[in-house]
Amino acid sequence: MARVATERVLRELEPSAERLVRRHLEAARDWLPHQFVPWSAARDFDGPLEGAAWTAEQSALPQTVRDALIVNLLTEDNLPSYHLLIATRLGRDGAWGTWVHRWTAEEDRHSAVLRAFVHARRAVDPVLLEELRMRHVAVGYRNDAPTLLHLLAYLTVQELATRQAHRNTGAACGDPVGEALMARIAADENLHMLFYRGLFADALQVFPDEATVALTDVLEDFTMPGFGIPGFRARAARIAAAGIFNLDVHREYVVLPLMRALGVMTLSGLGPTGRQAQERLGRYLERLEEQALRTRRLCARITAGEAPAHLTTVDPEHLTTVD
C-alpha cells in the first residue's frame, strides 16, 4: 500500500487541528506548579549548603512507587527530544504550530514540579536521579514512525498510557499531596490524549486504510517513551508487579477505551489492506487478553508471596510485553 505523503495528511487534517486546538484551549485549566510542592517538608541536602545526605529510610514511599516516580520524571525530562520530533513532523505554522508550542509549555510543568516534589519529600536518591537524567537526556529520544499517521497513532496511545501511569502512581503513593499532584498531571495528559484521539478519529475517516494499518502497527509494537532510561526494564517490571502499569492495565485502561472511542473494529469502507489490518488488530486483541489475564494472575501471586521462585524478582517479559 502506498504511503500517504506527510504534506497531504497535514493539509487534510488541518481543519481538525484548528478545531481541536480551540477545544483544548477552552478546556485547559492553567495551574501553578509551586502550589503542589510541600515546601515546608523540605531540608537542605549535603553539598555547598552543608545539609544532610539522602538515605533510603528518609523516603516514606514504597520502592515500587519510587521506581514509578523515577520513570515518570525521567520520561518527562526528555521533553526537548519530544518537541523536536513533533515540531519537525507537524511543523510550526498555523494550528499545528500553535498546538506544538502549547503542548510543550504544558508538558514543561510536569518535570519541574515532579522534581521539586521528590526533592521536597526526599522521595528518591537525588544523586542517582541526576545521574540518570544526564545519561537519559544525553541520548535523547527517537521515534522511527514510518508515516505521520503512525506518529499520530503512537501519540494517541502514548498520551493515554502516560495519563494512566501518572494516575496510578499517585494512587499508590499513600501521600495526599503526591496523589493530588499526579492527578493534576494526569488531567493535562488526558486533554493531550483527547487532542490526538480526535485528530486520529478524523484521520480514520479521511484515510481509513492507511490509518487502520498505522494504528495496528503501533499497538503491536508499542513501547513507552521512557524505555531508554537506564535500568528501565527492571523498574518497569517492579512497577508492573505492583499493578501500577502492566499489560492488564494497558489493556483495560488504554487499548480497549481507544478501540471503543475510535470504532476501528467496526470501521466500514475499508479496502483489502484496511481489512487485513483489522483482522491483524483482532488477533492482537486476543493475544493481549490472554497475556493480560496471565499478568493479573501473576501479580496476584506476587502480592500474596506465592510466585514461583524464578519469578520472585519479576520477569519483565511476563508483565510488560505482548508476544
Image (tube, helix red, strand yellow):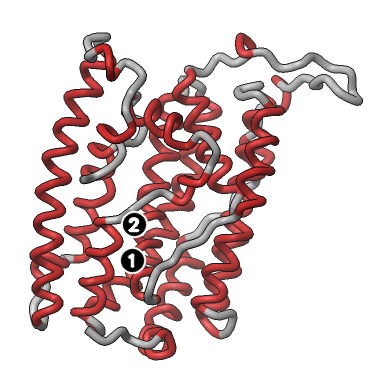
**Residue 23, above or below 158:** below
What residue do we see at 25% from left, 23% from top? Answer: 299
Q: Is residue 153 left or right of residue 257?
A: right
Near-viewer residue (287 or 64): 287
Q: Is residue 124 left or right of residue 223?
A: right
What residue do we see at 50% from left, 59% from top? Answer: 28
Amino acid type indicated by mark 1: Ala
Which labelled disc corresponds to residue 213?
none
Amino acid type indicated by mark 2: Val
**Residue 82, above or below 66:** below
Q: Is residue 280 left or right of residue 312?
A: left
Q: Quadrant of the C terminus?
A: top left
**Residue 313, above or below 102:** above
Q: CA distance from mark 1 to mark 2?
A: 6 Å
What residue do we see at 15% from left, 60% from top? Answer: 281
Near-viewer residue (227 or 197): 227
Q: Quadrant of residue 166?
A: top left
Q: Label 2: few (<14), some or many (≥20) within 10 Å?
A: many
Near-viewer residue (226 or 249): 226
What residue do we see at 21% from left, 31% from top? Answer: 295
Q: Quadrant of residue 244?
A: top left
Q: Which residue is mark 1?
A: 153
How far across and down, in percent of the image, does residue 287 sit? 13, 46
Q: Which residue is mark 2?
A: 157
Which element carries disc 2, helix, strand or loop? helix
Is there CB contact under 8 Å for labels 1 and 2? Answer: yes
Q: Label 1: few (<14), some or many (≥20) within 10 Å?
A: many
Q: Quadrant of residue 114?
A: top right
How far across and down, in percent of the image, does residue 274 sit? 14, 76
Which element carries disc 1, helix, strand or loop? helix
